[in-house]
Amino acid sequence: MQIEMGFKGMKTETIAAISTAMNSSGIGIIRISGDEAFEIADKMYYSKSGKKLSDMPTHTIHYGFIKDGQEMIDEVLVMLMRAPRSFTAEDTVEINCHGGVYAMKRILELAVKSGARYAEPGEFTKRAFLNGRIDLSQAEAVIDVIQAKNEYALKSSVSQLRGSVLKVINNLRSRILYETAFIESALDDPEHISLEGYPEELEKRLQDMKKELAGLIKSSENGKRIKEGIKTVIAGKPNAGKSSLLNLLLREERAIVTDIAGTTRDTLEEDITVNGIGLTVIDTAGIRSTQDVVEKIGVEKAKNYVQEADLILYVVDSATGFDENDEQIMQMIEDKKAIVLLNKTDLCPVTTEEMVRQRMNKPVIPISAKTTNGLDLLEKMIRDMFYEGKISFNDEIYITNMRQKAALESAFESLCRVEESIRANMPEDFFSIDLMSAYEELGNITGESVGEDLVNEIFGRFCMGK
Ligand code: GDP
C-alpha cells in the first residue's frame, strides 16, 4: 500500500507536546505544529507591545508571557517557523519556558484548551515524513541520534539523517527502474528496441548492484556494534583488578544514559565508551561487588555471560602466578574474541607477557589500572578487532538499523533470482518481476513503498514530543 504523501489541500490538526525531558531543568520547550499553530499561540501569548505572533515574520523569536485568562503562567521566548521551513514542514511554534515540570504541563494543557490536541509519540517526525521533508531512513536516524550513546553512533546517525542512506538507495533504485523500463519498452516495441545481448549486459550490471548491496549488508555488522556497543565481559580471578579497570573506564568517559521513554535499559549492563567506541559491559552485581566472577555467580552463569559476549577482557594479575581460576577462564574463552590485560605492571612481575603468550593465542596488553598505563592501546586493539578498516563517516555508510538490513537482504535475493532467470534463459519479463521486487524492497528503506501499519509502528517507537 502506498502512503499518501503530504496533506495538500487538507487542513491538518494542530498537535502539541512537551519536547524536552519531563524533569526540572533550565529550559522546557512546548512544540505546537499544524495549520492553527500561530492562532493557538496567539490565544496564550501576551507581550507588552501587544503584537500578535501571527503577524510576525517566520524564523523570529519573541519575548513575552504565557497567560491563561488573567493568570500569568510563565515568562517565555517564542520561536516561529512557518511552513514549509520547519521540522514538520508545517507552521510550528516552539515555546521556550522555564523547565519546571508544572510550568511545562500548564502551557501544554493551555495549548490543548486553545485548540491543539496532544501529539502522539513521534508524531512530529511522522509529519515530517508524510509531508515529504525527510524519508523513512532519515526519520529513523532521528531516533538514533536521540538514543546515540557514543561518538560513532552519533556520527553514523547524523550522516543518515543528512540523507546518506537515502542517496545510495535512491541511486540503486533508479538503476533497477531503468532496467525494468528498458525491458518493458523492448517487449512493447520489439521492432525498434532489440533485447539481443541484453541479458549478458544486465548480468554485469547486476553484479555491480549486488556488490553494493553486499557492502551495505556487511556494514551492518559494524553498524550494530556502533549502535548497541560491543558486548563485553570483564573476567579475571579475585583481585586481578577487574573493578579497578571498570571504574577507570567508567570514570574516563561515562556514557550519557538517561531514562528515555521507549528505551529499555538492562540494569545488568553498563555503557561505557573507550575513545568513542561503545562497550556494553555486562556488569552483574557479582562481577562488580564481589571479587570473584566464577565463585560468586557460578561457573555455569559465568560461562553464559562469556558465551553471549562479543569481547572478553581477561584481566590477569601480573603480580601473582596463574591459579585454578585462571585455568577455568582460559578454557572458557578459548574460542572467543578476547584481549588479555596483564594488569599491575607497576608491580614486580611474577607472570610475564611471555608466560601469557605461551598459554594463550590471544593479544596481550600490559596495563596498570593504578597508573592507567596501556589503556590507550586497548582502544586501538578493540578498533582493529571489531571494525574492519578505518571507520570514516565522510563517505562510508553504516547500516545500523535491522529493518533496513532485512530490506537490503531481500533486495539482494531478488537480484540473485534475476541472475538465475538469466542463466536459465528465461524470457525477459521474468527479469522484470524480480527487478521490481528488489525496487520495492529498497523502497521500504526510504519509506516509498511501506504500508501505514509499518509507519505507525516505526513512529510509535519515538519518544513523546519528537
Ligand atoms: P577485582 O577483584 O578483580 O575486581 O580487583 P580489584 O579491582 O578490586 O583490585 C584488587 C586490588 O588490586 C585493589 O586493592 C586494587 O587497588 C589493586 N589493583 C588493581 N589494579 C592495580 C594495578 O594496576 N596496580 C596495583 N599496584 N594495584 C592494583
Image (cartoon, rainbow, N blue to C red):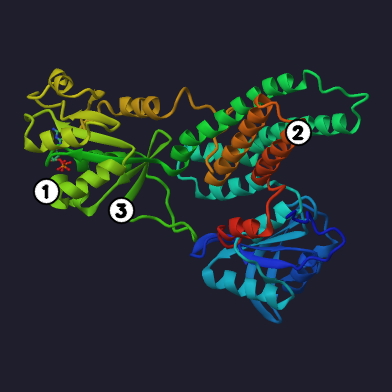
The quadrant holding residue 404 is top right
Residue at 31% over, 28% down:
378
Secondary structure of the residue carrying numbered label 1: helix
Residue 395 visible in the shown view? no
- Going by the numbered disc 3, the residue's amino acid type is Leu
295 w.r.t. 70: above or below: above
The quadrant holding residue 437 is top right
Q: Which residue is mark 2?
A: 174
Between the C-alphas of marks 1 and 3, the distance is 18 Å
Query: Is mark 1 in CB contact (under 8 Å) with mark 2?
Result: no
The foreground one among 230 and 100 is 230
The foreground one among 172 and 312 is 172
Residue 386 is situated, as x and y percent measured from the top left of the image, at 40, 30
- Residue count near mark 3 (Cα–Cα under 10 Å), binned few <14, some 14–19, many ≥20: few
Q: Which residue is mark 3?
A: 268
- Given the current orientation, which residue lies at the most extreme bottom position? 70
The foreground one among 452 and 201 is 201
Secondary structure of the residue carrying numbered label 2: helix
Of badges 1 and 2, nearer the viewer stands: 2
Query: Is the residue indicated by label 1 positioned so its CB lies within 8 Å of ligand 1?
Result: no
